[in-house]
Amino acid sequence: MMYWISMFLFWIYVTLFYPTKIINKKNLVTKKAIWASNHTSNLDVLVLGTRVFKRFYALAKAELFKNKLFGGYLKSIGAIKVQRGTSDINAVKTCLRVLKEKDKPILIFPTGTRNSSPEEVQDLKNGVAMFALKANAPIVPIVLVRKPKLWRRNRVVIGEPIDVSKYQGQKLTKEIFDEINDQITASMEAMINKYGYKNKTKKRKKAEA
């Protein structure tokens, strides 16, 4: 209940102050899946959540849970605490339980840094591929084409799901992780290049010259 109350209130806030259009929503997998998105600001989860308006879970850095009241609220709406820079076994178990038992998607930012350019969606962390392989869950690449700013229009683009079922039963190697990460990167780069505002502005100026 708390999740949907929060989502409704955030929907009003984002719609009024951060107008964002969602593109290719038909590609979104709303059951067991990994939503892999670039990371542009602390508003990303709110913007994504209110545009898709579906139940999902998301990894959140442990520092956000230091305040017990706020930490309890984050847990109630589906945030999963993770210790960054370590092998957080508890977070891994929680994520796999959400995927396998709750049959719900998990939002992960595999870039590890805040970015919105094609050059910065490379060298992805292996978390997305690892969870997808262990749970046999499709990966849905998602892109915010630019950082959310007050009153500025933006776009959330949903890429075609990446099927990892062909890797089932195989030993998880660096080559497999790299192959999956390359697919995610290629999808993100293509969406940023196609729907990015800066690229369209450059094309328009070039045409007018």
Image (cartoon, grey):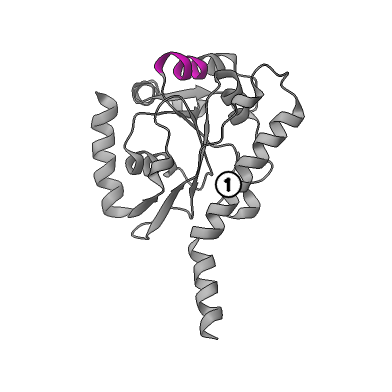
Which residue of the protein is positioned furthest toward the bottom in this rendering?
209
Q: Is residue 17 magenta?
A: no
- Compare residues 116 and 102 and report the one nearer the observer: 102
The residue wearing badge 1 is 187
Residue 97, given in percent of the width and then of the height, sits at: 47, 14
- Compare residues 34 and 8 and report the one nearer the observer: 34
Residue 62, given in percent of the width and then of the height, sits at: 51, 25
Residue 72, given in percent of the width and then of the height, sits at: 36, 20
Residue at 36% from the left image edge and 53% from the top image edge: 21
| Residue 165, picture quadrant | top right
Residue 143, given in percent of the width and then of the height, sits at: 50, 47
Please say if 198 is above or below 72: below
Q: Is residue 6 visible?
A: yes
Q: Is residue 124 visible?
A: no
Question: Magenta part mainly helix, strand or loop?
Answer: helix
Amino acid of disc 1:
Ser
On the rendered image, what quadrant is the N terminus found in?
top left
Please say if 64 is above or below 169: below
Residue at 63% from the left image edge and 47% from the top image edge: 186
Residue at 41% from the left image edge and 23% from the top image edge: 104
| Residue 203, picture quadrant | bottom right
Q: Is residue 166 left or right of residue 5?
A: right
Residue at 50% from the left image edge and 44% from the top image edge: 159
Q: Secondary structure at mark 1?
A: helix
Around disc 1, counting alpha carbons within 10 Å, would you say few (fewer than 14), some (14 to 19), or many (20 or more)? many
Q: Is residue 116 left or right of residue 24?
A: right
Q: Which residues are magenta?
A: 94-102
On the rendered image, what quadrant is the C terminus found in?
bottom right
| Residue 162, picture quadrant | top right
For the image, the number of numbered tags is 1
